[in-house]
Image (cartoon, helix red, strand yellow):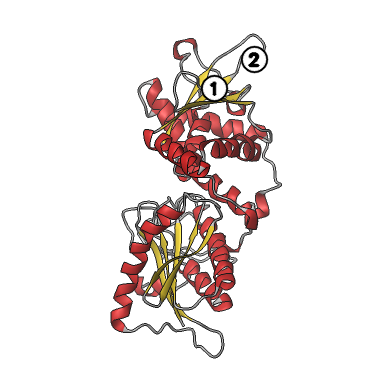
Amino acid sequence: MQRGDSLNSPFVPFSPNPSIQQGTPTSTPPLKHTLSSSTSSNLRYSSSRKSIYDRHLNRSQRSELSKASFAFLFGEMVQYAQKRVNGIADLEKKLNLHGYSIGQRLLELLLWREGRSAKRETRILGILQFITTTVYRSIFNKPADGLEKSRDNEDEYMLIDNDPMVNSYISVPKEMSQLNCAAFVAGIIEAVLDGCLFPGRVTAHSVPTEQLPAKTVFLIKFDDSVIERESVLVVTRAL
Amino acid sequence: MSFYFAIVGTKDNPIYEAEFGTSKQGGDGVARFREEQRSMNQFIVHSSLDIVEEVQWATPTMLYMKCVDKFNNLQVSCFLTAGNIKFLLLHDQKADDAIRQFFTDVYDLYTKTLMNPFYEVDMRITSGVFDGKVKQAAKKYL
């Protein structure tokens, strides 16, 4: 089959390799369900001729996922990351990266679902409220338990979750007690902030208390540029 | 009436471009830019990025930002998505409502593209299906 033919067909597969940016299909075949014989070509077409553009974005809005299947997937994710890193910081970074790509998509999807009245957030408090309520509610079905501003540092905020759902089936051995797998959720939060142009770092820390042994604090540290911009915006708003 | 549409990513890199003409009132849907004009289109759109960045921090913070820039007789309208992706449309006549509906349609398509786990933010959109649907939306609204 000619490569030229495949360029004209409407079913050109997405190139998974970001360094190939011209629209020519690569030799790695996409993992799509196929009925047609694939001996001669590397392109596979969905047998129903439907693409992702035909699915409605609200389809998954009311659907729920069983906690068990997520816990299984997350456990495997942690194990996968663990084999490829040496050190707790690296492991948290890898989990953060996994959450990052989810956060990017979640941000766009949630704002799209707001419809015509969607508004972009330009203030720190606005975006943090968005995360605490909308984002958290869409993933965990409940808003986060608390949002605090640090007294010592201007650029630090803390989001509190009394019992992160992702940690409920992860048991951390004593020698790795610094590890908190909610780094995954921290990645989601970081992606939402980055997408709205509030660059910074988000880390997860466990602060167990008597009644809440699994309490986790997400420390959000913004870059200097964000704080500067915030102060400029306050001034212009006040005028 | 011709249009030049571009999607620009977070690093000011073009992700997708398209040209079309109006399909209303007997137009045949083909863009009619003069040859010199065509190469200018990209520059005009690129320079309006500066203005977009300035305006995006002003209130109100709606996604659709209407006309942000004028150049000779051409106007640039902008739509800013949540993840800071800019949809820019270069046009020569005012058509606020139609353009807004067109942007909303493309926003829908972009979000669907983003849902693909193999598509990273700032990657070029090379799908023929996406292209077809954008042109379809253009035919419907513009």
Q: Is residue B70 left or right of residue A54?
A: left
| Quarter of the image with the C terminus of chain B in it | bottom right
Mark 1 or mark 2: whose residue is earlier in sequence: 2
Task: Please give the name of the residue rendered at 40% of the width and 21% of the height, measured from the top-left corner.
Answer: A88
- As drawn, A145 above or below B30: above
Q: Residue furthest right?
A: A62
Residue A175, picture quadrant:
top left
Which disc number belongs to residue A61?
none
Residue that label 1 marks: A217
Residue A148 position, x and y percent, is 56, 24
Say which of marks 1 and 2 sits in front: 1
Q: In the image shown, does B47 or B28 lie closer to the viewer?
A: B47
- As drawn, B141 above or below A104: below
Question: Do the residues at pointers 1 and 2 share their chain?
Answer: yes
Q: Residue furthest front?
A: A239
Residue A166 visible? The answer is yes
Q: In the image shown, does A108 or A27 lie closer to the viewer?
A: A108
Element under disc 1: strand
- Label 2 amino acid? Leu
Element under disc 2: loop
Residue B138 position, x and y percent, is 52, 75
- As drawn, B116 above or below B130: above
Residue that label 2 marks: A212
- Label 1 amino acid? Val
Q: What crowding class fits label 2: few (fewer than 14 Cα within 10 Å), some (14-19), or many (20 or more)?
A: few
